[in-house]
Image: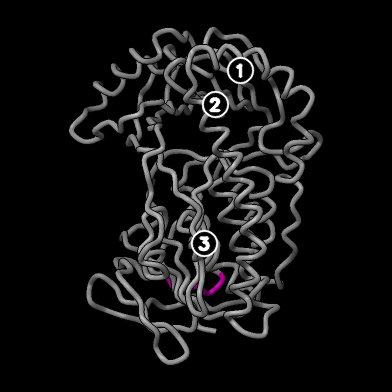
Amino acid sequence: MEVIVAGGGVSGAATAIALRRIGSDVTLYETHPDPAGQVGSFLSLASNGLRGLKTLGCLDQVQEAGFAVPTQRMWSGTGRLLAEVPRGRLSGDPLHSTTLMRGSLVEVLRECAEQAGVRIVTGRRLAGAEPAGDGIRAQFADGSSARADLLIGADGLWSATRSVLDPGAPRPAYGGLYSVSGIAAGVPAETGTFNMVFARSGAFLHIPAPDGTVWWSAQVADPRPPKLTDVGEDRWLDRLAELYRFEPRPLEIIRATTQLHRPTLMHTLAEVPVRHDERIVLVGDAAHPVGAGQGASMAIEDAVVLARALAKADSTGEGLAEYDRLRRARIGKMAKAARINRDAKTRGPLARRLRDLVMPIAFGHFYEKATTWLYTHDLGTLPAPAEQPRPAER
């Protein structure tokens, strides 16, 4: 089967690898000349995503590109410890959550894809698609086109493929939060711990890295999206210092910042009713931007499940329908958890006080039961990779 993957981020690269494992001829098209560039900030992969990477044969490389974070702690704005749990896993699971820059993850997956025999073409952005016999013809913004049996939309939150499938598909909406991330130096901190501070202005995340720096992200609650352009780093840091002036630890880290990443608005997307037809399918954020620290992990899960469903099916359409059936309930449950997570970062004063009272009890008694469905999910296996010649760009 000839496959076009539109989008060279986490979901696109992972899906390309998975489809090569079942023998598909895969070409990945990416808009930017360097799809592995340091776009965005850091992310964490939970144990379910890491098991997906193991299935794809990329786990060791990804772990080497990041660092393990076995523990998660939640703090009140005043510095009181609210809860301590395993980070992105159940207690006793030796597969510890891995934190790394998004660009580093994409770079590793791209290398794995090329080694698997995927052709990667850069500088082409999907603009449309139309049926071509019993296949599909992808049309790119530069006027070129390519034909395949299957088009996979891995083109993210603002997916063009989603609009091809359904012109009336939901559009992203601002979710009441924006994120500013950076790296601080000279702040004493305990490594191996993901820290989340529930502050007055939203959540503040910080993770000490092995090199002594602290990676941080301020998720600021604001009902109106701020202008992100024409604001220098110093002004952003001054703004954040003002917003987090009541929280000692976040303020200390903000003031010690040596590198600031590009601020981003955080969006939500209503459930996408049409995720596939007979020739097109959506994966990753194009289908479901779940958030709650599971975006990359769920995209990796998508890749494995899609490949397995296609390998077992008698037809492409049947395989896509089975993939959608298998993923829809799990993604829906994850989206609900993400809404709860998002709401916890945008609560008013009374709700914040109630949360600080309830959280130690809830996490102490119910964390394992509440997350077993997420972290113990069995994706199954894929065929062992065959030796592949390095592909030529086309």
User: Is 205 placed left or right of 392 in the picture?
Assistant: right
Q: Label 2 belongs to which residue?
A: 344
The reply to whether residue 213 is visible in this rendering is no
Q: Which mark is residue 355?
A: 1
Of the image marks 3 and 2, the number of the one nearer the N terminus: 3
Distance between mark 2 and mark 1 Cα atoms: 8 Å
Distance between mark 3 and mark 2 Cα atoms: 27 Å
User: Is 328 placed left or right of 372 in the picture?
Assistant: left
Nearer to us: label 3 or label 2: 2
SS for tag 3? loop
Q: Which mark is residue 227?
A: none
State the image coordinates of residue 17 (x, y, percent, origin top left): 57, 67
State the image coordinates of residue 171 (x, y, percent, origin top left): 37, 53
Magenta stretch bounds: 116-120
- The answer to whether mark 2 and mark 1 are in CB contact below 8 A is yes
Of the image marks 2 and 1, the number of the one nearer the N terminus: 2
SS for tag 2? helix
User: Is 252 placed left or right of 305 in the picture?
Assistant: left
Q: Nearer the viewer, residue 34 or 321?
A: 321
Q: Residue at x 38, y 76 (%)?
A: 393
Q: Label 3 belongs to which residue?
A: 283
Q: Nearer the viewer, residue 353 or 190?
A: 353
State the image coordinates of residue 279 (x, y, percent, origin top left): 49, 79
Nearer to us: label 1 or label 3: 1
Looking at the rendered structure, the kind of residue marked 2 is: Ala
State the image coordinates of residue 254 (x, y, percent, origin top left): 39, 18
